[in-house]
Amino acid sequence: MSCLKLTASTIVIAAVSATAAAARDQVQIAGSSTVLPYAAIVAEAFGENFDFPTPVVESGGSSAGLKKFCEGVGEGTIDVANASRRIKDAEVAKCAENGVTDIIEVRIGYDGIVFASDINGNAFEFTPEDWYRALSDTIVVDGEVVANTVTMWNEVNPDLPAQEIQAFIPGTKHGTREVFEDKMILAGCEAVGDYDVFFEANGGDKKAAQKQCINLRTDGRTVDIDGDYTETLARIESNKDGIGVFGLAFYENNTNLLQVATMSGVVPSTETISTGEYPVSRPLFFYVKAAHIGVIPGLKEYAEFFVSEEIAGPDGPLAEYGLVADPELEATQAAVSNENNM
Amino acid sequence: MSDATRHSAPRTSLYTLSPLTKRRNATEKRFKVYGLIAISIGILALLVLLTSIFSNGRSAFMQTYVTLDVLLPAEKLDKNGNRDIEEMKAVSTFGYAPLITNALISRLDEIGFATDLKKKEIGAIVSKEAAAQLRNFVLANPDSLDTTVTFEFLAGGRIDGYMKGRVDHESAALDNKVSPEQLDIVDALIETGSLEKRFNWAFLTAPDASGQRPEAAGLGVAFLGSLYMMVVVLFLALPVGVAASIYLEEFSKQSRLTDIIEVNISNLAAVPSIVYGILGLAIFINFAGLPQSAPIVGGLVLTLMTLPTIIISTRASLKSVPPSIRDAALGVGASKMQTVFHHVLPLAAPGILTGTIIGLAQALGETAPLLLIGMVAFVREYPAGPPEGFFDPASALPVQVYNWTQRADPAFVERASGAIIVLLIFLILMNAVAVLLRRRFERRW
């Protein structure tokens, strides 16, 4: 049967490939689920205002998107990869190996990462130190490295309310997790001085000390959410003590259900993130395959439209949805129209 | 001797139960109770599922519309004044949006409603989709410039939520995307009849929309994508599956090879569907060069997935045709081929169709294999008519459900549940047809 099936499918493929020779006329995009809503807004507006068809936007994560992007050049490969982090050197090398040498990097703006809890619960004013002390696997007490056993937020910091520690944080497949570890846990670890102790204890190994900082406890006080923010929200609705990690845009859409915590005294908003006052944010990118410009109709126009003032500017629909506009947008616009490669 | 046996077996009445019979009856009763409990748990779970889906999704079939008279000033929309469509295209939807806001403000003046909200906040009552609707109208009717035209626009997602009871003044006070003052305007508009809720055909026909306009999102593209895939599956899986089963059942000799094939078919029927997605990506897209996100690839992948189901059910229904039919046909001189096609196949047809429909229903609800071939995507462009449309990007009904559950705006919750209702209705229809066919045409021997 398998043999028969294979022959049958080969015949079918042969039949359909013959008719499929027509050129692809719409832009294909894949990548980060954080960038997806923005890309969808731009794609929609692009389809409405240009004669080109609306681009097709897939999600699946930054790494998956960049992997697809680097598969090669040609109509069978995607044109744009969305990413919530900068492309890695290893990925650039992989791209080059497959013939994708000219890549245009476009930074579209910044995404804030906020900490929010149930609207009717306690209000929180956090610092990275609090989160490190609450969630790290091991902490330093009187110079000794001990396992973390705190259960209440006010044990971490007497100024915080007496509420059980229960955190819903992004799972490791999310780009957000890396930012959370870097800007919260590691920053808190360094701020309270535990990093130096770990550094000594690990015999001067920087990597190992950092790793010890960001190793989170596994006793159920912190839960990895591998799904989307909708899942995090559902968890908080069922467990009112929970505090979740969200993107600013998601929070902005659900302000009637969530209250946001301040970080080091700063309330997260597009303004405080763009000035850099609010510490937990990261840039968002998309990458364009330069070899496809001129081959796939509308590709360059899409990239230019994305970073245009009326879309990505501080008064555009992206900022309205929760993207923090890039103060250096003009430089990005110039880079896109000149097709500056990385 | 006969006396002895008569005495050794105690006389029992059929009216009084022996302890053994009592025990057996009790066991039977217990088993019936277990069965009832099992069934009621199942029914309860189904009821909970259906109520939650229907209570969430019912509202997706209604939508709020605002009726406004919009003035279309030529000096803004056609600066050169020569009604050249290409030149008029230079004005983007961002240029059209203020016209709608102005129309709403003048409507509020008309009904004498005073508000100190900013222009932008008043404009937010109407969906962002409205600007595109207006632009398309003007580009299609350039003569309408400098006249006032009455339009029906979608209301914004939060306003729609207010009409459906999802948003109220209390929650609006906390909500960044809507304010109680905007709701006051809505109340005034309802009173004057400019704003009303009615049946939402667009939910079934419109394409998907971005996270900023949940009110405009519909199932149109997903619907076509699913339809195209089902056509591909039907036209590939049915002939291939039936031919394979007829050969295996009627012509091939029982050998080690056919045994291996048989085991493999049963195995394939149980393979997780994502595996077919991986296969599809490798063969159809990477090797054969078929386009991504296209229904043809989805259809081919789902064909591979459905084939084992169809083959197994076809073989079962061929097997259920009694050998006497074949013997009789062969006896009056029919060839083997004639026996199968004139006599066995027609008798097995109801069973084959039932199996095919169940296989199709299974394929209709499948998302996992589509994930890898790029159909789990934001697609707004309708695929063209067949046959070119098979190669255009499209999504599918279950994919749309999956996509909508991930969106941040709470208005997508009702859309996702609404899409589930549509999908369920299709599945029920297909399965009902399968049951009907079986009842009506199946012959018992």
Image (cartoon, rainbow, N blue to C red):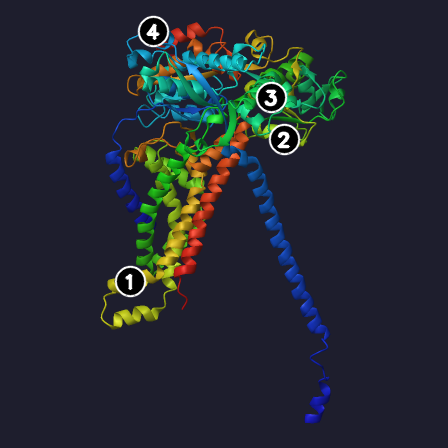
Subunit bearing disc 3: A
Classify B188 as above or below B422: above
Q: Where is residue A236 shown, x and y percent of the image?
A: 65, 28
Q: Do labels 2 and 1 touch, CB within 8 Å?
A: no
Q: Which quadrant would the N terminus of chain B be assigned to in this image?
A: bottom right
| One can see residue B218 in this view | yes
Both labels 2 and 1 in a single chain: no
Classify B320 as above or below B394: below
Both labels 1 and 3 in a single chain: no
Residue B96 position by quadrant: top left
Q: CA distance from mark 2 to mark 1?
A: 59 Å
Q: Which mark is residue B217?
A: none
Both labels 4 and 1 in a single chain: yes
SS at circle 1: helix
- Type of amino acid under label 1: Val
Return the residue at label 4: B79
Q: Nearer the viewer, mark 4 or mark 2?
A: 4
- Type of amino acid under label 3: Lys
Both labels 3 and 4 in a single chain: no
Return the residue at label 3: A211
Along the viewing direction, whichever of B403 and A289 lies nearer the viewer: B403
Q: Nearer the viewer, mark 3 or mark 2?
A: 2
Subunit bearing disc 4: B
Q: Residues within 10 Å of mark 4 (few under 14, many from 20)?
A: some
Q: Do labels 3 and 4 touch, CB within 8 Å?
A: no
Return the residue at label 1: B340
